[in-house]
Structure formats: structure tokens, C-alpha cells
């Protein structure tokens, strides 16, 4: 029986999984550095959960934008749509005639409307996504400032009860200075994040739509030759992104408890940066959806590190920008090396899945 060749006995990592692995290692190193540098803050389990409690809306926006970016597109209107949803839902809840369920439907409807509009113009009229979503951003921002210019606190009893609801983890927590054990708490928005991560990961990994998105993002002409309906795939990706932005807006309202013209500001830029840090290529076709939350956690950890150091807040943007440069250059280097015949980063035999 002939011996197996070296390439046959090893499973080569795909580009998406390789970049995801690098992103995961960077996050672990970043958070490990935070634990060593500021153990008083980062050693507490609640600090880690608060990354999700207070930033659940950003995690959700990043997920929706990840799907579009893997398909080779971009959507810079998601932050403005998120802000518009928070204000409209706040106005509905404060009107006295709206319910929490009605506000949820309104949020989904607004996100779906923007997603359908953008998807149709980009996919079927073949207009550049940056221009279309830029127009969508201006439209959503204009509507937001027209509806209500002042902050609007929501006092609807049902909504307040939902917003204040917390889920305790009795076996996980910290002991305060008085020796009292305080269990960790998570907000309902965190559950929404977990559910969406699972659903979107399954969608991108095992569904025909997910395979089509990767094919379209990699090479549209080749995707057409394979019989993939490119226009419909692009259209559905923007519809999904818009719907996700609507969900994010309602979760953002649950986090802040008020509609404000500043809600969702720069979410689109943070979401793009988070996806890049999570190993999603801006050119499309390469990326692991699980990299979206990993990249978001990396970005938030950087901000928390700077805050713990007591440095001016404007340094957060500087450091985030420099790291974004680093991630883009790192992606380019890795992809260039992957194109060389001699470069191989593969799984060893003991890690190879059994057939």
C-alpha cells in the first residue's frame, strides 16, 4: 500500500478559517494583556458580560453587515437606520397607544423597508452600494432629526419592565468588599445576540444562501456560470442586513431607554472595523461569520483598556484606527503568502477530522 503524501495527510485551513483563527488569537492576547495590566477591573466576570450588556446593538449590527461584506458589498446606512428605529419606537411607546410588541414590529418594518430599497437598487439596477447606502444614511438621519430633536425617555410600564429585566447566573459572580457574593447579570439584549449569532452562523455555514454569498463575494462571474442567481443573492443579503439593523435599533432602545438623535452614531464605522478585525475581507468572499463578534469584542476591549488607563477618550479612535491599519495589512500579507505555492499552513494529522 503506497504511503500517503504529505499534502494528502494534512488538511489545509481555508482562508476564512485562517483569518478567523488569527483574529481569535489576537483577541485572546488582547484580553490576556488586559487581565494582567488591570486585574481589578478585568478579573471580574461582570466586566466581560458588560461588554455584551451595553454593546448588544453593536454586535447585532456587525452581524448583519458581515453578511453583506462577505458578499462583496457594503452598507453604511445601518447606524442611521438603527438611530431612526430607536426614535420611532420611543415615540410609539410614549404615545400611549403603542405596545412593546407593536414597537418590535415597527422596528422590523423600518429595517426591512430600508433593506428592500437598498437591495433592489443595488442588485437589480446595478448601482454602486456605497452611493445607495450613503443616500440611505442621509435619508434615515434626516427623518430622525425631523421626527424629534430632543431626547425622548420611554416611561411605558411594559417596556420599562422589559428593559430592567435581568438574568442572574447564580454560580458565577464576584465577592464584594463586605464579603457578599454578587452573581453576574445579563440583559435580554445579550440573548438576542446569542440567538442571532447561532442563526446566522448556521445560515452561512450550511444553507444554500450562505454558499451563494461566498461564491458571489469571491467572483460574481464565476457564480453566474455556476447557475447562482447573483442578483437575488445580493438582494437578500441587503434585506437581511436591513432587518438586522431594525433589530439592533430596538435592542439599542432597551439599552439606553431613550430615543436620541445621537443613537447609532458611527455604528457603521465601528461595525466595519469590527468585521475587519474579525477576519472578514473587504473585497468579499472570505470571512467567518463568527469573526464578527470576535472582532467586536477586540474593538471593545481596546476601548476598555484605554478607559482603564485613564487616557483621554479621543485616543480610542486613534488606537482603533492604527489597529485597523494593522489588521488590513496583516490580511493582505496573509492572503499574498497563501497565493504562493510553497506557503502552506495546515492542520496536523491529529487535528484532522475523522471521515
Image (tube, helix red, strand yellow):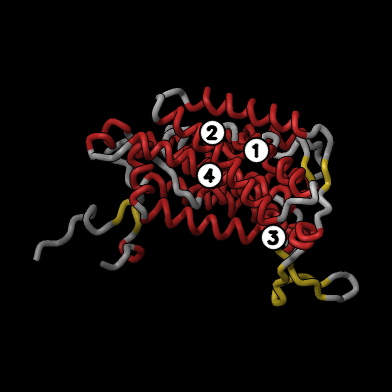
Compute the Cα span from label 4 to label 1: 12 Å
Q: Nearer the viewer, mark 3 or mark 4?
A: 4
Compute the Cα span from label 3 to label 4: 22 Å
**Which callout, 3 or 2, points at the residue further toward the start of the chain?**
3
Residue position for label 4: 64
Judging depth in this view, the residue of 52 and 121 nearest the camera is 121
Q: Residue at x 70, y 35 (%)?
A: 265
Q: Residues within 10 Å of mark 3 (few under 14, many from 20)?
A: some
Q: Where does residue 154 sit, x and y in percent of width and height? A: 81, 50
Residue position for label 3: 49
Q: Quadrant of residue 334?
A: top left
Compute the Cα span from label 2 to label 4: 9 Å
Q: Where does residue 8 sit, x and y in percent of width and height? A: 21, 56
Q: Up-down: is 188 above or below 336?
A: below
Horizontally, residue 335 falls left or right of residue 199, namely: left
Horizontally, residue 211 falls left or right of residue 99, namely: left
Compute the Cα span from label 3 to label 2: 28 Å
Residue position for label 2: 75
Q: Residues within 10 Å of mark 2 (few under 14, many from 20)?
A: many
Q: Nearer the viewer, mark 1 or mark 3?
A: 1
**Which callout, 4 or 1, points at the residue further toward the start of the chain?**
4
Horizontally, residue 139 falls left or right of residue 94, namely: left
Q: Where does residue 218 sit, x and y in percent of width and height? A: 35, 36
Amino acid at each position: 500500500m503506497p504511503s500517503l503524501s504529505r499534502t494528502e495527510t494534512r488538511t489545509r485551513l481555508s482562508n476564512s478559517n485562517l483569518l478567523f483563527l488569527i483574529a481569535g488569537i489576537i483577541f485572546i492576547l488582547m484580553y490576556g494583556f488586559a487581565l494582567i495590566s488591570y486585574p481589578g477591573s478585568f478579573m471580574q466576570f461582570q466586566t466581560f458580560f458588560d461588554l455584551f450588556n451595553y454593546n448588544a446593538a453593536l454586535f447585532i449590527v456587525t452581524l448583519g453587515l458581515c453578511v453583506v461584506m462577505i458578499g462583496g458589498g457594503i452598507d453604511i446606512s445601518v447606524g442611521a437606520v438603527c438611530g431612526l428605529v430607536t426614535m420611532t419606537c420611543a415615540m410609539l411607546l410614549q404615545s400611549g397607544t403603542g405596545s412593546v410588541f407593536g414597537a418590535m414590529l415597527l422596528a422590523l418594518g423600518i429595517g426591512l423597508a430600508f433593506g428592500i430599497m437598498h437591495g433592489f437598487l443595488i442588485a437589480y439596477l446595478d448601482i454602486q452600494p456605497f452611493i445607495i447606502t450613503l443616500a440611505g444614511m442621509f435619508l434615515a438621519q434626516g427623518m430622525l432629526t425631523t421626527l424629534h430633536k430632543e431626547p425622548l425617555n420611554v416611561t411605558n410600564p411594559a417596556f420599562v419592565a422589559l428593559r430592567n429585566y435581568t438574568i442572574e447566573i447564580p454560580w458565577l459572580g464576584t465577592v464584594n468588599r463586605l464579603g457578599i457574593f454578587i452573581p453576574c447579570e445579563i440583559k435580554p439584549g445579550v440573548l438576542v445576540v446569542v440567538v442571532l449569532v447561532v442563526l446566522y452562523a448556521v445560515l452561512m455555514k450550511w444553507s444554500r444562501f450562505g454558499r451563494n454569498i461566498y461564491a458571489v463575494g469571491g467572483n460574481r462571474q464565476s457564480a453566474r456560470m455556476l447557475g447562482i442567481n447573483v442578483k437575488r443573492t445580493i438582494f437578500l443579503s441587503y434585506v437581511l442586513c436591513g432587518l438586522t439593523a431594525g433589530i439592533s435599533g430596538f435592542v439599542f432602545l432597551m439599552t439606553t431607554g431613550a430615543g436620541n438623535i445621537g443613537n447609532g452614531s458611527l455604528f457603521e464605522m465601528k461595525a466595519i472595523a469590527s468585521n475587519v478585525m474579525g477576519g472578514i475581507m473587504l473585497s468579499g468572499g472570505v470571512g467567518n461569520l463568527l469573526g464578527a463578534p470576535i472582532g467586536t469584542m477586540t474593538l471593545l476591549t481596546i476601548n476598555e483598556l484605554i478607559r482603564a488607563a485613564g487616557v483621554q477618550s479621543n485616543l480610542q479612535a486613534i488606537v482603533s484606527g492604527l489597529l485597523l491599519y494593522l489588521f488590513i495589512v496583516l490580511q493582505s500579507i496573509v492572503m499574498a503568502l497563501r497565493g504562493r505555492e510553497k506557503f502552506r499552513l495546515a492542520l496536523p494529522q491529529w487535528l484532522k477530522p475523522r471521515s
